[in-house]
Image (spheres, grey):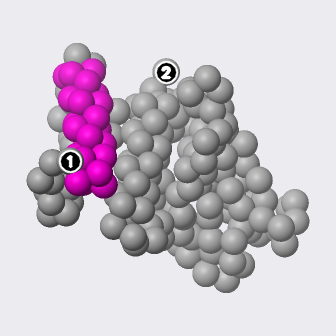
Amino acid sequence: MKTITQNILDTLVVGIHEDIQTLFMMIMDYEEEIDMITKEEIIIAHENLKEVILFCQSYSRGMDVLLMEEVMVGINDRVAELFGAKNTTDQSNTIYGEKLLLPEGVTVRRKLEASSFQYIFDHTTFGEIGQIVFQKENGDILYFDVYFGEHITEGSTPAQILKDIGDMLQKEILRSY
């Protein structure tokens, strides 16, 4: 993969923020029936924004990848809410902006809350094995914590799987610094 400069990434991020503002203005206009914004226009703007975010994520490093993933989850939730659909937080087998492939049998759901961004991991055999929670302080993600699922015990196979995922994620985040 060809590299791009930090200047280009910074420019893309500014454009992404502008596109997010535009999308949310479209949503507000649609809800309040102020302008002739259609459902199709919002869907197209949403899809275009997702494409740019995924592109930018593929070239980003460190916590920037997680921040964009958090933004993506928030946008997806808002658009799903607008159209009365429950956002079916897709089960995926990748994390960290689709850069890290999870072990076989493990899938992840993403959850966004006011004070955290979370990966919730499920295993085909063991069920929910735990979470990685990125706590936000003053709007910034500074660290993450790993929590085992309710039925998971320290030293068990699912606990080791979750620990390995946490180690892999930490290594990737720190690799960029």
11, 34: nearer the viewer: 34
Q: Is residue 133 left or right of residue 172?
A: right
The amino acid type of the residue labelled 1 equals Ile
Label ID, residue 22: none
x and y percentages locating residue 177 in the rendered image:
49, 21
- Count of marks, rendered view: 2
The answer for how far apart the CA atoms under marks 2 and 1 are is: 46 Å
Q: Position of residue 13 (x, y in %)?
A: 28, 28
Determine the image quadrant of residue 5.
Answer: top left
Q: Which disc is residue 34 wearing? A: 1
Magenta-drawn segment: 8-33
Identified by mark 2, the residue type is Tyr
Q: What kind of secondary structure does the magenta stretch mostly adopt? A: helix
Residue 110 can be seen in this image: yes
- Direction bottom: furthest residue: 125
In the rendered image, residue 49, in percent from the top left (x then y), is placed at 23, 46
| Residue at 42% in and 62% down | 81
| Visible residue check, residue 100 | no
Residue 66 image offset from top left, x and y in percent:
47, 39
**Residue at position x 45%, y 27% in the image:** 176
Asked which secondary structure carries label 1, the reply is loop
